[in-house]
Amino acid sequence: DEVYERLVYRGAKHVSIASLSDFKDRTITLCGLSKSHAMAGFRIGWIIGPERFMNCYKRIHEQTAICAPTLSQHAAVAALSSPEVSLEYMLTEYQKRSDLLIDAFEKDIPYLEPVKTNGSLFMLVSIRELVNQKMDEMTHHIDQDEEIKKLLKDDELSALTNGSFPSETAMAYILSKTGVLMMAGHYFGQVGDNYLRVSFAPEHETIVHGIERLKNRL
C-alpha cells in the first residue's frame, strides 16, 4: 500500500518495495490519489503487479467493483496531468503543521513525547510517562465520567479502567479532560500500545486550538 508515497518530508525519500532487486516479481503495489491529491471521496486508485497476480485480481474485480465512477476517472486524469503546485503546497503546509506539533509536545505539553515523522499525515506520541505517572488517576477519572461511559460497552469500560490497554485508557482520559481526540496506538497492533496517533491534517487554527487545550488541561 503506497498511497502515502508522495507525502514525504525533511529530505526523506519513498522507496517502492517493487523497485528493490528480487521483489518486482512478487510484489503487488496499491496506489491512489486520496492522499497526494486530497481526493479520498473519489474512490479511485490502481494496482500494479506481476501478470500472474493481475489475471486473478481481474476476475475478482469484474465481479465486485467493475470500474471507478466516470467522474472520478476524469478527475484523476486532470489531477495527474496538472502541474504539481498543489502537491508542493500541501507538503509545505503539512510539514509546518507537523513541526508545530512536535515543538508543542517537546516544550509545552506534559507527559507526551513526540516521535518525529518523515511522511504521511500522522505522528505518534509516546504515553509512557503519562502511564507511569498518572495511570491510577486516568482510570479513576474515566470511571467517574458519565459521558465517556455512555460511549462504552461494559467490557470496554472494564478494559479502560483496569489498564489492560494503556493507549485506549490514555485516549479516553485525554478526550475527557481536554476534548482533544487522539487515536489509540493499540488499534494498529499490540506494538502501538505505548503510543497515541495524532493527525496533522486539520487546519492550522484547529491544531493550535488543540495544543492550547492540551497545555492547559492535561
Image: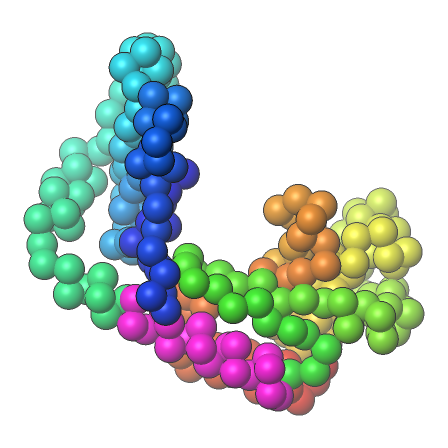
Q: Position of residue 16 (x, y in %)?
A: 34, 41
Q: Position of residue 5 (x, y in %)?
A: 33, 49
Point 31% across, 36% down: residue: 19
Q: Is residue 32 visible?
A: yes
Left or right, 87 with respect to 15, comes to left
Magenta-colored span: 91-108
* Residue in view at x 71 percent, y 46 percent: 190
Q: Is residue 105 magenta?
A: yes
Given residues 118 and 127, the one toward you in this image is 118
The image quarter containing residue 179 is bottom right
Please tell me in which quadrant of the rendered image residue 21 appears: top left
Give the residue drawn at x 41%, y 59%: 119
Q: Where in the figure is residue 43, as x and y percent of width and height?
A: 31, 39
Q: With 76 as the anchor, is 136 left or right in this view? A: right
Name the image quarter holding residue 143: bottom right
Residue at 72% x, 77% y is 111
Task: Let me know if residue 181 appears in the view.
Answer: no
Q: Is residue 72 left or right of residue 12?
A: left
Quadrant assignment for the N terminus: top left
- Classified by dominant secondary structure, the portion drawn in magenta counts as helix
Residue 129 sits above or below residue 63 on the image: below
Q: Quadrant of the C terminus?
A: bottom right
| Magenta-colored stretch includes residue 152 | no
Q: As rendered, which of 41 and 92 lies closer to the eye?
A: 92
Q: In this orientation, which residue lies closer to the viewer: 143 or 104?
A: 104
